[in-house]
Amino acid sequence: MKLYEFEGAPSPRKVRLFAAEKGLSLPTVSVDLRAGEQFSDWYRQIQPRCTVPALALEDGTVIGDSEAICRYLEAQQPDPPLLGETALEQARIAEWLRRIELAGYGPVADALRNQSPAFAGRALPGPDPIEQIPALAERGRWRAQRFWPTLDAALAAGGPWLLGDRLSAADLFAFATLEFAQRVELGPDQELPALASWQQRLRQRSTVQA
Amino acid sequence: MKLYEFEGAPSPRKVRLFAAEKGLSLPTVSVDLRAGEQFSDWYRQIQPRCTVPALALEDGTVIGDSEAICRYLEAQQPDPPLLGETALEQARIAEWLRRIELAGYGPVADALRNQSPAFAGRALPGPDPIEQIPALAERGRWRAQRFWPTLDAALAAGGPWLLGDRLSAADLFAFATLEFAQRVELGPDQELPALASWQQRLRQRSTVQA
């Protein structure tokens, strides 16, 4: 197996965190997004949608989505379970992954990609030219600030992890989203104590530091 | 179990199609989205995010997302498998569900909700007031027209189903998305033969007609 990824990008980080918790070490190939390498001929042959991460299997099959890659790794190596064991755990984690995507990561990406000059003409990932929409950047900023308190409230009501006692993919995906948001100045604009201590707990894990 | 849903809405339909393929008959409760019943006090107590579908379990636990509900049903009743058996099938289906959501359903919803007067002030589902962005409606229309040919090409290259020989949740979710898009005049604006015959095959299933 080989993981195509890029150090600073949030989606590949979700997969790296997930693999680290499984104790898996995946050989990686860097695709330099800053230099536009995802649009190169060689990478288009691997992933025509020009996105990272992508996992290439031994037989050349490519899985091109962070959650799908994690589901593959979970099925290959169930221990420790990060996508749920019981039906209800599986559902809860799937529900969180969708909320994180649609209400957290999506708004952060909308805010960044519809405003930063670095993304002019490519406000969405992939090969299609997409013009920026300033009003969507504004909506994204507003929605991101609505999202962080919902994470904080969920952790304050339960914890130490989003699903309760056991770390899951929901924590890893939310953490990658939060740290990325903070790096592009879209993190929480208020103090959120439960969220902050959860983030510290994650940062201290050897799997995260690795 | 009880499924809160609404007849004309696409996301509850995904769950109804999925349950029908499993041979499950879920008692349903209609939440009249046209009358704004998702914002009523009684429904907020069930699903504070004011969205359908929501599945209430015997003990009162609520799962509030179409994919999460399907994952719950799959774990409870694995036969017939609709979310994949092997690791690779599971990954492929997860990858399709994300593409359908992010590149198909999302653009259709963007186009509809950012333009139709019926959605003024609530361009996104949920209780938050969200103003419409006309440029996002336009982007959504354009992206939807980019999406249908990718479905068609995948079916033309393989088939009869998106994953090949076996019907999966990917077909059901894509079908619900396509039929909804057509109803709001956002379906394909060109002839796509493989997509059209796949749609016919699905329409003829007894589970879909039910």
Image (cartoon, coloured by chain):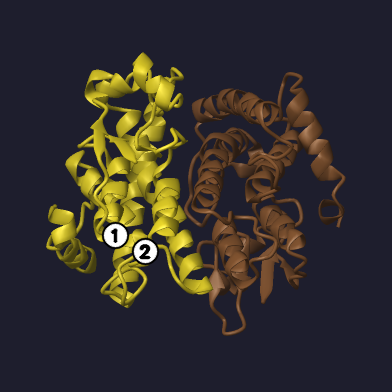
Chain colours: A brown, B yellow
**Outermost residue, front direction?**
B59
Corner quadrant of residue B56: top left
Q: Name the quadrant containing residue B171.
A: bottom left
Quarter of the figure that contains the C terminus of chain A: bottom right
x, y (%) of residue B163? Answer: 37, 71
Q: Estimate the x, y position of residue B61 in percent, counting from the top left.
A: 46, 35
Q: Chain of mark 2?
A: B
In this view of the protein, which residue sits in the foreground, A116 or A49? A49
Question: Which element carries disc 2, helix, strand or loop?
Answer: loop
In this picture, residue B119 sits left or right of residue A52: left
Return the residue at label 2. B82
Amino acid at circle 1: Lys
User: Residue A39, can we see it?
Assistant: no
Q: Residues within 10 Å of mark 2 (few under 14, many from 20)?
A: many
Q: Element type at marker 1?
A: loop
Q: Amino acid at mark 2?
A: Leu
Reading the image, the residue beneath label 1 is: B22
Does residue A44 lie above or below B54 as drawn? below
Q: Is residue A11 above or below residue A163?
A: below
Q: Residue furthest top?
A: B41
Question: Which quadrant of the rendered structure holds the N terminus of chain A?
Answer: bottom right
* Residue B163 in view (yes/no): yes
Frontmost residue, B160 versus B155: B160
Which sits in the foreground, A4 or A134? A4
Whether A137 is drawn above or below B35: the answer is below
At a point 58% along the width and 68% down the height, the residue shown is A75
Return the chain for callout 1. Answer: B
Task: Look at 59% across and 64% down and name the residue there.
Answer: A69
User: What residue is shown at x 53% (from left), y 72% (from top)?
Assistant: B87
A73 sits to left or right of B100: right
Q: Nearer the viewer, residue B143 or A14?
A: A14
> Marks 1 and 2: CB-CB under 8 Å?
yes
